[in-house]
Image (tube, rainbow, N blue to C red):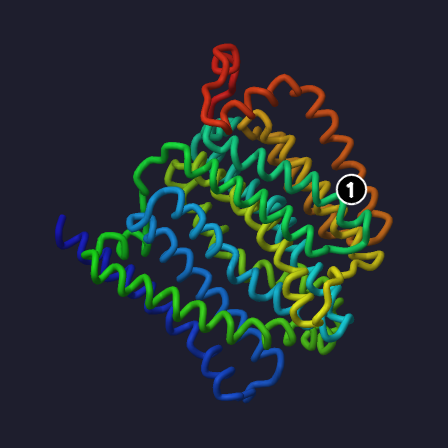
């Protein structure tokens, strides 16, 4: 058993080392001001560096849960989980403060990341659960009521953004307040001991001093590489779109988030495959909360600092449509999990509707999809309105009514 454990640990250290090595070329290119391979190849190098660092941050964040209190761990992990996506999006917002032409790309990256998470990651977790357990309903844990309510608050508020045509600094304050309240409520709930897997487990099982040295080193290295790579990666995507004849907006909207979201997708998929689908679903729901609060709220700060202005990040016609569609999709997702469960039909709708609006990115279709999402949301909310008080009670740390417990689906 000891030999097997040692072999497994050795493999995990090789995986960690592989991520470190994969991230290195991006750092060398940026610090050395080198561009030996051309824009497209350089963009791929920077993108791979960000993906590798995202995995390192995810492993280190999970392993750090053995070091700090549950509430603080939640805040730290939430902040770290969005760092790669945050770095790329903040780069676009910063550039927009100096050149308004970059504003659409900040919105593209933000909306793409949010829609990808809900339209792909949520169904991915469910379908892995369905394949492994052969059950048509996945039940979330009661504690995830907090995430559902926080996501609902952020999603409903986000409808104000396209209506006023800007993401302002006061939006940052409101979204930050939602996130802080979310973290506070999570910290008050009892949590179980972290059940680490893969590289996170290998790091978490180190002696305390060694573990802390490894964690600090991974955090610092990953943060340095991400900060060095975010700017050239963001700019490279735009140039690459021009060279390949691809819509630059769509390239920024889908390729960049796919790179930065990869660790969350993989981690949630592994949890679901190992029979912990409820926890995996909680992870991706929590990620949506983080992105709708921290990521969206950070954009006007970067824009204001760069442009030395108190004006908000402007939204043109297309960006307002994109934000509206993203908010509508998120609101529908909240309605789906009002029952703290997700069914085969609901997961199929999430991925099917996402595929439609992904494959047909036209103005009239975007607006039509937003309306469809809202109509379905209204139908579900009216049908399940009696569940809302119980959801609120669970978020405050209470117990569900006996009737709810008896009729709740299990998975």
The x, y position of residue 86, in whole percent, is: 57, 61
Circle 1 is placed at which residue position?
Answer: 370
Residue at figure coordinates x 37%, y 32% from the top left: 190
Looking at the image, residue 26 lies above or below residue 360: below
Q: Nearer the viewer, residue 370 or 10?
A: 370
Residue at figure coordinates x 29%, y 66% from the top left: 14
Residue at figure coordinates x 71%, y 47% from the top left: 326
The x, y position of residue 318, in whole percent, is: 82, 57
Q: Nearer the viewer, residue 146 or 350?
A: 146
* Residue 47 quadrant: bottom right
Q: Residues within 10 Å of mark 1 (few under 14, many from 20)?
A: many
Q: Is residue 10 left or right of residue 28?
A: left
Kindly give the residue lying farthest to the right in the view shown: 364
Looking at the image, residue 146 lies above or below residue 365: above
The x, y position of residue 218, in whole percent, is: 36, 66
Q: Nearer the viewer, residue 60 or 172?
A: 172
Q: Considering the numbered disc 1 on the image, is that residue within a helix, a strand or a loop?
A: helix
The image shows a total of numbered marks equal to: 1
Residue at figure coordinates x 45%, y 83% from the top left: 28
Looking at the image, residue 350 lies above or below residue 323: above
Q: Is residue 382 left or right of residue 132?
A: right
The x, y position of residue 319, in whole percent, is: 78, 56
């Amino acid at each position: 058993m000891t030999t097997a454990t040692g072999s497994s640990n050795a493999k995990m250290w090789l995986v960690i080392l592989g991520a470190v090595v994969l991230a290195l070329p991006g750092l060398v290119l940026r610090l050395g001001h080198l561009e030996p391979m051309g824009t497209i190849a350089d963009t791929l190098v920077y993108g791979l560096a960000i993906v590798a660092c995202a995995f390192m941050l995810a492993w280190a964040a999970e392993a750090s849960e053995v070091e700090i209190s549950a509430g603080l761990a939640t805040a730290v992990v939430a902040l770290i989980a969005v760092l790669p996506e945050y770095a790329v999006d903040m780069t676009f917002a910063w550039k927009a403060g100096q050149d308004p032409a970059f504003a659409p790309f900040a919105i593209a990256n933000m909306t793409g990341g949010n829609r990808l998470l809900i339209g792909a990651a949520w169904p991915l977790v469910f379908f892995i659960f369905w394949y492994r357990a052969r059950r048509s309903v996945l039940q979330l844990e009661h504690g995830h009521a907090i995430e559902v309510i926080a996501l609902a608050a952020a999603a409903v508020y986000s409808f104000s953004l396209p209506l006023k045509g800007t993401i302002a600094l006061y939006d940052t304050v409101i979204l930050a307040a939602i996130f802080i309240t979310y973290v506070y409520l999570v910290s008050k709930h009892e949590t179980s001991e972290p059940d680490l897997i893969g590289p996170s487990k290998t790091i978490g099982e180190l002696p305390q001093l060694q573990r802390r040295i490894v964690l600090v080193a991974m955090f610092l290295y990953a943060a340095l590489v991400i900060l060095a790579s975010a700017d050239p990666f963001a700019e490279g995507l735009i140039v690459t779109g021009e060279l390949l004849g691809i819509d630059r907006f769509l390239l920024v909207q889908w390729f960049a988030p796919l790179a930065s979201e990869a660790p969350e997708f993989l981690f949630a998929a592994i949890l679901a495959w190992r029979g912990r689908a409820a926890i995996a679903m909680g992870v991706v729901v929590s990620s949506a909360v983080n992105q709708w609060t921290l990521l969206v709220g950070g954009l006007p700060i970067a824009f204001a600092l760069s442009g030395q202005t108190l004006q908000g990040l402007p939204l043109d016609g297309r960006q307002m449509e994109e934000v509206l569609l993203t908010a509508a999709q998120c609101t529908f997702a909240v309605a789906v999990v009002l029952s703290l469960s997700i069914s085969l039909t609901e997961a199929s709708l999430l991925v099917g509707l996402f595929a439609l609006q992904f494959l047909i990115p036209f103005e009239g279709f975007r607006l039509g999809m937003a309306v469809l999402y809202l109509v379905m949301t209204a139908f579900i909310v009216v049908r399940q309105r009696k569940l809302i008080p119980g959801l609120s009670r669970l978020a405050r740390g209470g117990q569900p009514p006996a009737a709810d417990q008896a009729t709740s689906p299990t998975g």
